[in-house]
Image: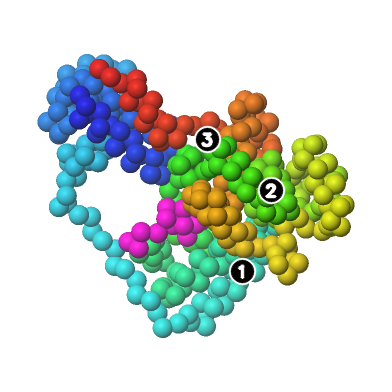
């Protein structure tokens, strides 16, 4: 049974890296577990016996869904119908062109104009779409569904991150909408929204960083505390000013050009206001060495440097990790997910619920503890 348990644990690890939703992941692991726990061999023959002896006898079982889930489990373990050797026909990979044609440069200009006149898109999204559309025309002269698919396939061949590929698909779909050819649009995979806490620091590591900064630079110390207590995105907290802190709250434009309110803890706000008054600080809380507002890249580099000096894992200390940390800490003291969704600026509570999901390591530990038969 230990070998079968290891197969399930490996399969769970694989599922957490796919584009599937939490609902699909949960269903697939349940069906795979049911198949394995009944003692059938992990093979096509085992599945056929399972189908004949179990599935066909219970009409309440959603046959097609269970079949798809178990075959996915078998294929992952290279024991299904899609064994190595049966390769899908590969799309022809586009070659990089010598340059972007004048006609396509005009399309890019029109594309950007349409994006800029759409008030629902943030500056970051527009910039990302701009990078994607230029990259497409560096490889493809014509706008066609075949070129769309070939371009995306080439990105997959280069092992680009699923999130990046999704953004490129959205860029091409936006182009199709703008030129009035929605039939060219590709189906974007739905990314799994699981929280990877292995890439987020814990409370002990957070306090170690605070102790280091408190003895080195009080302004940096307060910067970290204010990020960790607001759950703001980097594009949002870089807009914080000392005057906002003194006021106790601020309304700022964030993701999707939406205005949302940020509150600052009363005790922390008083400490920071006194510190600002004593040191004659005003304007942006996050400034660079030239006295200008800090940029995202600069702050990310600072975090990595501080973490290294504290002998902490640099990969855990990235700007967005503080948003996850805020959510986890908040849920420890208050399980009101609706209120947390509002504080984080989520339009849907479903987005916030992923903070309640256990990490892969936690799931693996619980699974090994519970399944001992």
Helix, strand or loop under label 3: helix
In the rendered image, residue 165 lying in the magenta stretch gets the answer: yes
Residue 214's tag is 2
Q: Which residue is mark 1?
A: 112
The residues bearing labels 3 and 2 have C-alpha atoms spaced at a distance of: 33 Å
In the rendered image, residue 224 lying in the magenta stretch gets the answer: no
Residue 174 visible in rendering: yes
Residue 354's tag is 3
Q: Which residue corresponds to the image point at 46% horizontal and 53% vertical from the top-left?
A: 163
- Residue span colored magenta: 156-170
| Along the line of sight, the residue nearer the viewer: 134 or 26 | 26
Camera-nearest label, 2 or 1? 2
- Verify CB contact (< 8 Å) between mark 3 and mark 1: no
In the depicted structure, whether residue 230 falls above or below residue 285? above
Q: Which residue corresponds to the image point at 78% horizontal and 58% vertical from the top-left?
A: 284
Q: Earlier in the sequence, mark 3 or mark 2?
A: 2
Q: Main secondary structure of the magenta part?
A: helix
Q: Which residue corresponds to the image point at 38% horizontal and 44% vertical from the top-left?
A: 17
Q: Residues within 10 Å of mark 1 (few under 14, many from 20)?
A: some
**Where residue 231 appears, x then y in whole percent?**
66, 42
The residues bearing labels 3 and 1 have C-alpha atoms spaced at a distance of: 34 Å
| Along the line of sight, the residue nearer the viewer: 267 or 108 | 267
Camera-nearest label, 3 or 2? 2
Helix, strand or loop under label 2: helix
**Where residue 73 appears, x then y in whole percent?**
26, 36
In the depicted structure, whether residue 192 falls above or below residue 3? below
- Verify CB contact (< 8 Å) between mark 3 and mark 2: no
Q: Quadrant of the C terminus?
A: top left
Q: Residues within 10 Å of mark 3 (few under 14, many from 20)?
A: some
């Amino acid at each position: 049974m230990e070998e079968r348990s290891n197969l399930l644990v490996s399969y769970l690890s694989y599922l957490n890296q796919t584009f599937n939703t939490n609902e699909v992941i949960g269903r697939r692991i349940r069906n795979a577990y049911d198949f394995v726990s009944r003692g059938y061999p992990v093979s096509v023959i085992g599945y056929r016996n399972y189908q004949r002896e179990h599935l066909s006898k219970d009409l309440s079982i959603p046959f097609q869904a269970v079949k798809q889930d178990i075959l996915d489990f078998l294929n992952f373990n290279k024991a299904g119908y899609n064994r190595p050797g049966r390769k899908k026909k590969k799309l022809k990979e586009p070659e990089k062109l010598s340059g972007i044609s004048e006609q396509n440069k005009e399309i890019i200009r029109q594309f950007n104009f349409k994006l800029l006149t759409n008030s629902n898109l943030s500056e970051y999204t527009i910039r990302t779409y701009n990078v994607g559309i230029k990259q497409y025309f560096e490889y493809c002269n014509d706008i066609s569904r075949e070129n769309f698919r070939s371009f995306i396939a080439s990105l997959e061949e280069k092992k680009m991150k699923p999130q990046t590929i999704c953004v490129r698909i959205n860029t091409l779909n936006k182009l199709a909408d703008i030129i009035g050819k929605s039939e060219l649009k590709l189906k974007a995979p739905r990314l799994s929204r699981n929280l990877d806490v292995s890439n987020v620091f814990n409370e002990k590591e957070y306090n170690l960083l605070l102790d280091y900064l408190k003895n080195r630079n009080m302004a940096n110390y307060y910067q970290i505390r204010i990020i960790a207590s607001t759950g703001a995105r980097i594009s949002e907290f870089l807009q914080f000013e000392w005057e906002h802190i003194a006021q106790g709250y601020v309304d700022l434009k964030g993701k999707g050009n939406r205005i949302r309110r940020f509150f600052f803890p009363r005790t922390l706000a008083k400490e920071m206001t006194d510190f600002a008054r004593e040191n004659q600080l005003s304007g942006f809380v996050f400034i660079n060495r030239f006295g200008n507002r800090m940029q995202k890249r600069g702050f990310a580099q600072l975090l990595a440097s501080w973490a290294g000096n504290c002998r902490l894992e640099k990969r855990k200390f990235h700007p967005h990790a503080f948003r996850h940390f805020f959510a986890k800490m908040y849920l420890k003291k208050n399980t009101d997910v609706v209120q947390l969704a509002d504080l984080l600026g989520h339009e849907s509570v479903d987005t916030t619920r992923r903070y309640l999901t256990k990490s892969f390591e936690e799931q693996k530990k619980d699974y090994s503890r519970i399944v001992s038969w």
